[in-house]
Image (cartoon, rainbow, N blue to C red):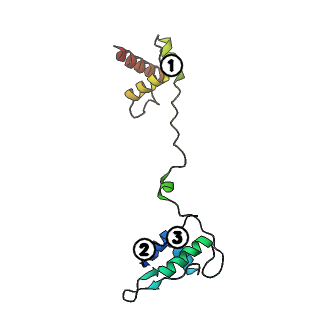
């Protein structure tokens, strides 16, 4: 594990200490309440919690050794990185091309040999909202045939 070293600051906030320990702030607070990490000192005038150099070194040593301030062993999970959180688990599957076998056979019977891709494009042009499901098969063949014939000119 690669725990960061104490930087040049004499005092840091609880959030900065959690980041140095490679933990989320909420997990760091949970471990602090459980006695794993020492509680921060309070700033004399503002009463804001802060870690001085000694406490910083203590927290980093606890993180590295896995032995808490209470003397009990503790296991740490890795803090997820932003890249790992946004990375999709799988690539979305491409939509399969619909099978237009009946339509292709009907067009072939009319003397027009074409591919499923061309038929899909013609249907998309004729029915942009996909409303060709309730149309009579003969009417559909006629419209696609005329569309493809008009495109050849």
- Asked where in the image residue 32 lies, by quadrant, the reply is bottom right
Q: Residue at the location (42% across, 17% down)? A: 145
- Disc 2 on helix, strand or loop? loop
- In terms of depth relative to the viewer, which is nearer, 77 or 98? 77
First-in-chain label (3 vs 2): 2
Q: Indicate left or right for 96 with 118 as reference.
A: right
Q: x, y percentage for residue 105?
A: 52, 17
Indicate the position of residue 49 as horizontal and vertical percent values: 44, 82
Q: Nearer the viewer, residue 152 or 26?
A: 26
Residue 122 in percent (x, y) is at 41, 24
Q: Is residue 66 above or below residue 105?
A: below
Task: Tell me the distance, in whole angstroms, between the alpha carbons under discs 1 and 2.
Answer: 74 Å
Task: Name which of mark 1 and mark 2 comes first in the sequence.
Answer: 2
Q: Is residue 88 above or below residue 20?
A: above
Could you give the CA–CA distance between mark 1 and mark 3, rounded to whole angstroms?
Answer: 64 Å
- Which residue occupies the extreme front position in the image? 8
Across and down, in percent, residue 61 comes to 57, 75
Distance between mark 3 and mark 2 Cα atoms: 16 Å
Q: Is residue 138 left or right of residue 150?
A: right
Density class for disc 3 (Cα within 10 Å; few <14, some 14-19, many ≥20) is many
Q: Which mark is residue 8?
A: 2
Judging by the rendered image, the residue that carries numbered circle 1 is 104
Circle count: 3
Mark 1 and mark 3 lie on one chain; the one further toward the N terminus is: 3
State left or right for residue 47 relative to residue 100: left
Circles 1 and 2: CB atoms closer than 8 Å: no
What residue sits right under mark 3 in the picture? 21
Residue at image location 44% in from the left, 29% down from the top:
132
**Camera-side residue: 82 or 57?**
57
Residue located at (53% from left, 72% from top): 27
Category of crowding for the residue at label 2, using alpha-carbon neighbours closer than 10 angstroms: few (below 14), some (14–19), many (at least 20): few
Residue drawn where x is 49% and y is 23% of the image: 116
């Amino acid at each position: 594990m690669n725990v960061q070293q104490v930087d040049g600051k004499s005092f840091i906030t609880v959030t900065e200490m959690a980041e140095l320990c490679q933990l989320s702030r909420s997990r760091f607070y949970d471990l602090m309440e459980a006695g794993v990490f020492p509680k921060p000192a309070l700033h004399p005038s503002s009463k804001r919690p802060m870690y001085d150099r000694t406490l910083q070194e203590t927290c980093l040593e606890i993180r590295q050794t896995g032995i808490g301030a209470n003397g009990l062993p503790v296991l740490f999970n890795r803090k997820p990185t932003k890249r790992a959180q946004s990375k999709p688990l799988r690539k979305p599957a491409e939509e399969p091309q619909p099978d237009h076998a009946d339509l292709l056979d009907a067009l072939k019977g009319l003397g027009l040999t074409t591919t499923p891709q061309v038929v899909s494009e013609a249907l998309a042009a004729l029915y942009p909202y996909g409303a060709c499901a309730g149309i009579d098969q003969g009417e559909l063949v006629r419209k696609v045939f005329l569309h493809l014939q008009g495109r050849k000119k």
